[in-house]
Amino acid sequence: MAATAYTPTVSAAAGTVLAAPAAVDAANGNSWVNTNREIIEITNGAGAPITATFTTYGTYDVGSVAYAIADLSVTIVNGTTKVCGPFDRTLFNDPDGLVIVNWSSGTTITARVITLGTA
């Protein structure tokens, strides 16, 4: 099943009102269009740590052998908020230009994506 899409909020020098964080989709994961200027704010309101796993699509070539680059796993301790990104397009974009993140749990976990605006 397709990952549930986030719509990023674009920041501005004069300030931007952030959209409310949304519950994560633990069953299908989440995605967003990546322009290399996005960050994701993840809040773990649960009673235990969770892991956000960002899928990578890059390889490291040695001779004629291409080795997959490991996905990025980030632990978010219970009761905390963590910001991740920005995400390099070459490494994190899927063929549709999306970053995909999967969750070890979705209970009381929220997130929102922010695109860093230009000055």
Image (spheres, grey):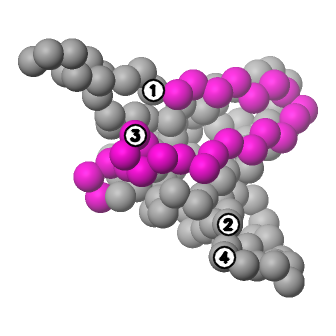
The span from disc 4 to disc 3 (Cα, nearest Å) is 23 Å
Identified at 52% across, 57% down, the residue is 36
Q: How many marks?
A: 4
Q: Quadrant of residue 15?
A: bottom right
Residue 3 placement, left or right of 102: left
Where residue 64 appears, x then y in whole percent?
A: 9, 18
Identified at 63% across, 46% down, the residue is 85
Residue type at mark 3 is Leu
Residue 6 painted magenta: no
Q: Quadrant of residue 60?
A: top left
Q: Where does label 1 land, which residue?
A: 71
Residue type at mark 4 is Thr
Identified at 40% across, 40% down, the residue is 91
The span from disc 2 to disc 4 (Cα, nearest Å) is 7 Å
Q: Quadrant of the C terminus?
A: bottom right
Q: Where does label 2 land, which residue?
A: 116
Q: Earlier in the sequence, mark 1 or mark 2?
A: 1
Q: Is residue 79 visible?
A: yes
* Label of residue 118 in the image: 4
Q: Which residues are magenta?
A: 72-96
Task: Determine contact: label 1, label 4, CB under 8 Å.
Answer: no
Residue type at mark 2 is Leu
Q: Is residue 33 above or below residue 64?
A: below
